[in-house]
Image (spheres, rainbow, N blue to C red):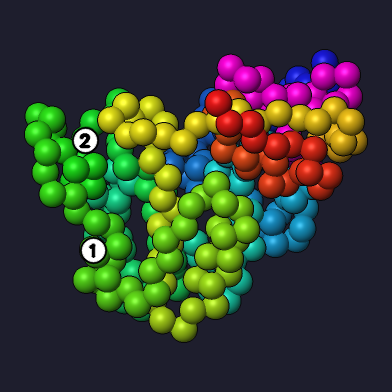
Amino acid sequence: MEMLLPYLKAFAVGGAFCALGQVFIDYTKLTPARILVAYVVAGVILGGLGIYQPIIDFAGAGATVPLSGFGALLAKVEAGTLLHQGTHSTFFHSGMTGAAEIVYNHGNVIPVVLDNSITGMTGHQDNPGSGRTLQGDIAETLKIEDILAAYGYKNILIVDPQDLAAMEKAVQDALASTEPAAIIARRPCLLIKRIKHDIGKCEVDQDKCIGCKKCLSVGCPAVMVENKKAKIDPNQCVGCTVCAQVCPKSAIARKEK
């Protein structure tokens, strides 16, 4: 039950947001578009007043996934600078124009491209950044960093998103940059069969684990709590070590196959 509690909280709060939206649709003359805008505005106001953060602390994704969570994020923007993220395939399909507009119009937005080397959300179709055509023929890969450089981005930071310290440093460096900056978080999708992946398994030292549940914060489905101690499901773990990096007692370690 303890393991299910965060999911129940997220479901309850996220469901409440959905139910409220349905009430507006059924009993008011507001259009769905205006309701969505209202959620964003409400999130900005509640976030600015510091009211929304406790909701996030309680419900996690149940509060961050709804548009009110996006509004609360906007309220946290410092000095007019916003990090905007998009996936590898989305960059080629529709993100390139936005990146060009940002740098051309001197926008206070830092593009963050989540480069997984494939089209992940619709079935692993190849794209101009995967190195193969839709017919499966080998093609010259268009490099995201070269495109961004051609647009005029002077500070392009390429980082492994599973290296939390490096990722945090990249974000801070980009925010502090006086020149147009962009971040490429590069890590190939594990489901790409033609790539040889570095896969291992993480294990928990039960003697070192203090049951603080810090590892649960990374949101990995392989990490759970059993008998008040952290446990990792070997059938789901791929050895990324993100959980190990947040463990305050170094109780999690990667074991090679």
Give the camera-side residue of 12 and 41: 12
Instruction: Work out whether mark 1 precedes mark 2 in sequence or the reverse, and give the earlier one.
Output: 2
Q: Name the quadrant containing residue 176.
A: bottom right
Residue at 11% x, 43% y is: 139
Q: Position of residue 2 (x, y in %)?
A: 83, 21
Q: Please say whether residue 74 is one of the residues in the magenta stretch.
A: no
Determine which of the numbered discs, if any, sits on residue 71 in the image.
none
**Quadrant including the C terminus:** top right
Is residue 242 visible in the rendered image? The answer is yes
Q: Amino acid at mark 1?
A: Ile
Mark 2 = which residue? 126
Q: Amino acid at mark 2?
A: Asp
Q: Is residue 141 above or below residue 135?
A: below
Q: Secondary structure at mark 2?
A: loop
Residue at 80% x, 24% y is: 225
Q: Position of residue 112 (x, y in %)?
A: 43, 57
Q: Is residue 27 left or right of residue 102?
A: right
Residue at 57% x, 38% y is: 240
Q: Residues within 10 Å of mark 1 (few under 14, many from 20)?
A: some
Mark 1 = which residue? 147
Q: Residues within 10 Å of mark 2 (few under 14, many from 20)?
A: some
Is residue 220 visible in the rendered image? The answer is no
- The stretch in magenta equals 214-236
Q: Position of residue 128 (x, y in %)?
A: 18, 46
Q: Position of residue 198 (x, y in %)?
A: 46, 36
